[in-house]
Image (spheres, grey):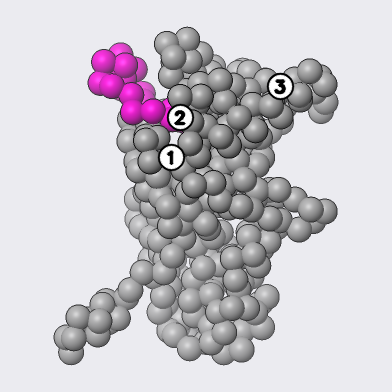
Amino acid sequence: MRLVRDEVRVQVPATSANLGPGFDSFGLAHALHDRVRVRATAGRTEVRVFGEGAGEVPGGDDHLVVRALRAGLDHAGAPQAGFSLDCENAIPHGRGLGSSAAAVVAGLVAARGLISEPEALDDHVLLQLATEFEGHPDNAAPALLGGATVAWMNGREAHAARIEVDPRIAVTVLIPTERLPTSRARAALPATVAHADAAFNAGRAGLLTLALSSRPDLLLPATADRLHQAQRADAMMASIALVGRLREAGHPAVVSGAGPTVLVLADLGGEVVAGLGPEWTVRRPAIDADGARTIPTHAEAQRASGQH
């Protein structure tokens, strides 16, 4: 295996995990992207970050994109090099929109784009590698595959399948200024759950598959949850309260991933969001149907257009 390109550009979407009842399994990709330019160099590794995370994340080999990139190259048996990375980040950090999964998937897809035999890093392999970084595949699956996904583990092996989303479904994302580390959100969960609550969520997760694919009129009952959102209320009181108000008004609202972002599977009107206050940013991204992908470099774009 060898490196056949010295530059690759990758685009990766933000994601929302869980979608209510599908804890650690369901996910959805948003057209809100991080873009990474990777160049192989003879020198030491350097990372420049613009946008979200600038001045906060490591600038060398400890950067998560670089770690994932090197893990992908190692798995494929490809040689290592120094790397120069430019990261243009639009995915907020610490808000439950899959920023860490996006970084991991970006590095892995970049590795695939650099090597002579990209089939060695097919989607199944990349999902497995990403899950080893993340601990679970719920964000990595939609970041890699796009659209809505259901992911599961068979022993230590990660799998995922896409759900074709009904085109009538729109998305509103309500992003608070506060952050919540995923580790803190997970620490709030109980070690065991009641059988009745597990049965409730199993039924609603099945209903969610139907609602996403062909019955958006069922999204409100399909996004009900008893396993993880109320249990995390002390860690994100404003988000849980907002989810409750929106659901009482008939909107299919859930906590995005570990929170504190609120995801609504509907296009909220201006009158609904007008009273949220300055601590909330409202976004209405399209659903990203493509997932992570390489995008042409400047030189490749010129060649494609016939310029020299």
Of helix, strand and loop, which one carries label 3?
A: helix
* Amino acid at the residue labelled 1: Asp
Instruction: From the viewer's perspective, tell me whether residue 176 is left or right of residue 140.
Output: left
Q: Report the magenta residues as a range.
A: 260-281
Of helix, strand and loop, which one carries label 1?
A: loop
Q: Residue at x 33, y 24 (%)?
A: 268
Of helix, strand and loop, which one carries label 2?
A: helix
Q: Residue at x 56, y 26 (%)?
A: 223
How far separated are the C-alphas under marks 2 and 3?
20 Å
Residue indicated by mark 2:
216
* Amino acid at the residue labelled 3: Phe
* Amino acid at the residue labelled 2: Pro
The answer to whether any part of residue 49 appears in the image is: no
Q: Are marks 1 and 3 in contact (CB under 8 Å)?
A: no
Residue 148 in picture, x, y percent from top left: 52, 45
Instruction: From the viewer's perspective, tell me whether residue 138 is left or right of residue 296.
Output: right
Residue 55 in picture, x, y percent from top left: 41, 51
Nearer to me, 257 or 120: 120
The answer to whether any part of residue 207 appears in the image is: yes
In which quarter of the view is residue 10 placed? bottom left
Residue indicated by mark 3:
200
* Disc nearest the viewer among 1 and 3: 1
Residue indicated by mark 1:
166
Residue 293 in picture, x, y percent from top left: 44, 65
